[in-house]
Image (cartoon, rainbow, N blue to C red):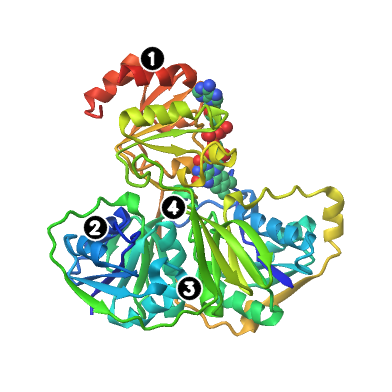
Amino acid sequence: MKILVTIKRVVDYNVRVRVKPDGSGVETEGVKMSINPFDEIALEEALRIKERGEADEVIVASIGGSEVQQQLRTGLAMGADRAIHVETDQPVQPLTAARTLLKLVEKEAPGIVFLGKQAIDDDCNQTGQMLAALWGRPQATFASRVELADGKATVTREVDAGLEVNEVDLPAVMTSDLRLNEPRFVKLPDIMKAKRKPLETIALADLGVEPAADLVATAYEPPPRRGGGKMVESVAELVGELKNKGLL
Amino acid sequence: MAKVLIIGEHDGQNLNPATAKTVQGASGLGIDAVDLVLFGADLDAVAAQAGALAGVQRVLTVTHDDFSHPLAARIAPEIAAMADDYSHILTGSTTLGKDLLPRAAALIGVNQVSDIMEVIDERTFKRPIYAGNAIVTVQVPEGGPVVGTIRTASFAAVGEGGSAETVAVDPRAEDPGHTRFVRVEGGGGDGPDLASADVVVSGGRALGSSDNFAVIYSLARKMGAAVGASRAAVDAGYVPNELQVGQTGKIIAPDLYFAIGISGAIQHLTGIKDAGTIVAINKDAEAPIFEIADFGLVGDLFEIVPELEKAL
Ligand SMILES: Cc1cc2nc3c(=O)[nH]c(=O)nc-3n(C[C@H](O)[C@H](O)[C@H](O)COP(=O)(O)OP(=O)(O)OC[C@H]3O[C@@H](n4cnc5c(N)ncnc54)[C@H](O)[C@@H]3O)c2cc1C
């Protein structure tokens, strides 16, 4: 069984993102970029499944400009067997991403497609569900535990009410939540080894993807700031303040 | 044709508060024709609650045993089959909404607007990106319905007083048979619901153990508050995952929020920005949580929290 893992290049989660003064976007110039943390978790899970002998090959795929090859190389250094770079210089929204991934799925016939539950740049939380819909296969989103047996997966999902367990037939789409695992650190020799692993580039235009009508971003603004607070010196003062505001 | 379809969420007995907030969010569209659809095995109780929501014209009930537990793979095709009759298809940005609606959007063939926090006009919305560090205004192109989740923390619940008619509708899709509900674990604690509570008391990594979290539970009980937590506290196993507040947990808007032993990482702050009043208790005077707190108290939580409980 093959596992296809998607990787998005995003602004690192430690960066405090700022809106450009003219409101035309957010500042990404010279900012540290990383694998979307949820995708890293998805990849770690795929690698563990392979290491348990339940999969033969882990493929990482990313859509974007040539710079996404950096993140694909990191994925290869973590342990993926090969990488697919779908090249485009245009930003890709979830429906187009899902249609693109479907083309890769048709080509590779994976047993599992593993995505992060959301990308921490656009925070959309859509692509995995969309791919599952277009593929006509199950989706097990927000996974915190995955067990495979007999062509089925039992997936524990983090939901508002607690944990929900679903059983899905494979092939299926899964999306990772934070507590699925802790991704491994990449070691230097693995980075060297990753340079020799296969990385295939396909132009998005050559895949015959039907373009989706994108949402049009017309303005960016910083979030409303909360008014300045006040330090209190004691519990009594805190209780007094809360009573003044009618909160107690 | 301007007509709104809202997908209601419920547990078989009670309508989820997210649904009344979604109706409020939809009211900003200025469209009077609002249908609320419910999927379930037995919908009498929740249909009555949904029909009472102000602003809902019709409640559509789709009753079938397949819907005794909501599964995206089963319900999304139902929504797609109804889509032609609507200009807008909305639901709350709960975990169910996030799971279900993108699947329906893809079948309909449109992108989804996630986490709508403000309605500008019928096809223009504001939504948060980058963990709430930026707000983007997006326009939905013509050529399909607007499909979106409503960020429930941005809207109050609509009141009651509506008298919608209830219309039974037959399912139009089949069970794809590849996805099965097994069970739900945990949840159902005794306190108020975290997502809709007026007061929330949250603890962070500083609590150090699940036993120590008792001080948080005790203060919460005294205040009639819900308990929340940072990711670090959940990861460490002090409390269950459904208590996580933040970018990837619950986004909440209580009147009063206590952040106790929580440093104030951006991913946590994005979950509480809409709180009325934020109180921070932290032993580090430099902790970023104090930058957004309305009231800050520096000190050891294990001394302060019991003292605060006594003072109430
Ligand atoms: C992709 C991604 C998503 C994330 N999503 C979320 C999310 O949804 N929600 C979330 O919360 N985090 C999230 N995080 C994690 C976030 O970045 C922080 O790591 C986390 O919020 C830290 O939790 P904390 O404040 O409890 O712990 P810490 O940052 O370790 O802070 C502990 C605080 O306790 C104080 N303290 C220690 N002892 C005491 C004492 N005795 N009395 C008083 N104060 C004391 C310390 O001064 C410190 O400020 C996410 C991270 C990533 C990468």
Mark number, residue B229: none
Is A225 drawn above or below residue B263 in the view shown? below
**Amino acid type at mark 2:** Gln
In terms of sequence position, does the residue under pointer 3 or pointer 2 come before the other?
Answer: 2
Is B69 drawn above or below residue B127 in the view shown? below
Circle 1 Cα neighbour tier, 10 Å, few/some/many (<14 / 14–19 / ≥20): few
**Residue beneath disc 3:** B73
Instruction: Give the distance between the C-alpha atoms of the residues marked 1 and 4, in whole angstroms.
Output: 37 Å
Instruction: Give the distance between the C-alpha atoms of the residues marked 2 and 4, in whole angstroms.
Output: 21 Å
Instruction: Give the distance between the C-alpha atoms of the residues marked 3 and 2, in whole angstroms.
Output: 27 Å
Circle 4 Cα neighbour tier, 10 Å, few/some/many (<14 / 14–19 / ≥20): some
Q: Which of B101 and B184 is in front in this view?
A: B184
For the residues tagged 3 and 1, is the chain the same? no
**Amino acid type at mark 4:** Asp
Q: Mark 4 CB in 8 Å range of ligand 1?
A: no
In the rendered view of the protein, which quadrant contains the C terminus of chain B? top left
Instruction: Give the distance between the C-alpha atoms of the residues marked 2 and 1, in whole angstroms.
Output: 40 Å
